[in-house]
Image: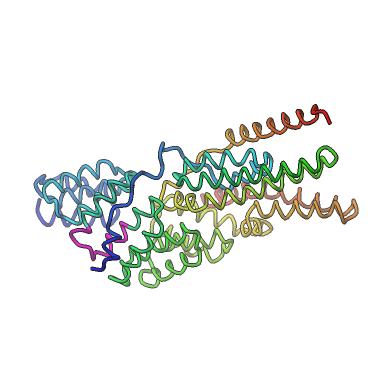
Amino acid sequence: MSDATFAAALHLVQMKRPQEALKKLGEAFDPEDPWEWWLRGVALFDLDREAEAAEAVQRGLALDPESTQLLAMLARCRLYLRDLGSAEDAILGALRLDAEDADNLALYAHIVAAAGQFEKAKKLLERARRIDPENEAAMRMQSFLAAARGDDREALLHSRELLAINPEDVHAHRVAGSLLHRRGDVESAAPHLRTAVVIDPFEHGVAELARENRVWRNPFMWPLRPLQRVGIGAMWIAAVTIMFVSRRVAPVSVQLAIAIVWVVYCVYSWVVPPLVRRWLDRHAR
Amino acid sequence: MSEHFDDLLQPTITAPPEPGGKKPWRVQSQFWIAFFGGVLAVTPIAYLNTYRLGAPKRSRHLILLSGFVATAVYAGFAWLWYPAEAYSLRMAGRIVGVLQYFVVARIQRDDDNRHQIFGSGEYASLWVPGLLSIGFALGVLVAVFTVLRMWPK
């Protein structure tokens, strides 16, 4: 394959057009070139065909067993195939060749985090940031890891840190948007989610969350915002406690009023969100 | 390269975290099971969910332990109040169940977050297992209180 054809296929992959990249690669595929196997693997991976991508990358590795890019790509495929042990073997192979590669350290952190080893992931990411303080993969993973540990404040901090370097990082917008939305700060979440959808309209999860965010910003949803902020469980506990206490201390009329208010609120919370969703969907068409 | 860094580059993954490939149940949805079915309903669901989440054994042991403690607390209330304070006993069952939910939710939290962020993020429906679990718990309570009622004073 000529350099020009390879460059064209690489450009198509970078432009998120993996199907066309595969077609371009197929025009003059050289099975003796490990880089072509790598690029084929990346395109297949982007098409969510991870098993085929891993096979392609392994064919490349048979030609060049010491390619850190091929090993890292194999690790990525294995990670998404949930074969974490093999993913670890592959990324450690790459790190043995270059232990100072911050991107691969971040990928290793992703693999161990997926296995639930958050502390090790944290240390790997700290190491990656020491090697390359502005490494975007490490910052992104630090943000994911903090979110997974339930530390929303730190997750937001890392997302904002990443957005200061790369304002178009879709993952940072996604994390910031989803965390702010989850905390009930739907107005602050909106620009992040809108930007994430504009950057990557094919990311289904973000589009879904952005739609949900629009629903929660509708004025009819304002009375339900405390539900989102404190959670349904906490609201029920508060309601049951108030009713329980009122049985002991308040007259029947007050008990009845409290019960009616709560029932109306519950019915409102069941009826209004689907109606708002339907109305917004119809309006969006 | 520091020694600390060398330690970090040793393989530590021994098993895949999501065995069986079954989707887990939402932790928040377990609240309703606790609310309607109490400790005996929410504990088995949370216990089974740890397998689906690929949680470590420690989580399972903690859920079982908290289940035993909560059941003992409820049994204590039953010992004190049955049959004179039936309403208070029902409320106590609900409150202990909801408190148990918060304990099991906290135990599952990290693994659930991991599933959301690093796993597929998909969940299975809890309707059928939830209703079965509530039915089982209420069945056990009815059986126990029936025996208590028949017990010679």
Residue A142 picture quarter: bottom left
Please state if B138 lies on the left or on the right of B54 as rendered: right
Please state if A251 lies on the left or on the right of A187 as rendered: right
Whole-percent x, y for residue B67 in the image = 61, 43
Residue found at the far top of this picture: B150
* Region rendered in magenta: A95-108
Please state if A142 lies on the left or on the right of A34 as rendered: right
Q: State the scheme by which the image is colored.
A: rainbow
Residue A28 seen in the figure: no
Chief secondary structure of the magenta portion: helix
Compare residues A85 and A270 and report the one nearer the observer.
Answer: A85
Q: At 47% from the left edge and 63% from the top edge, which residue is drawn?
A: A176
Residue B51 seen in the figure: yes
Is B101 inside the magenta-drawn segment? no
Q: At 66% from the left edge and 56% from the top edge, which residue is drawn?
A: A224
Whole-percent x, y for residue A285 in the image = 51, 49
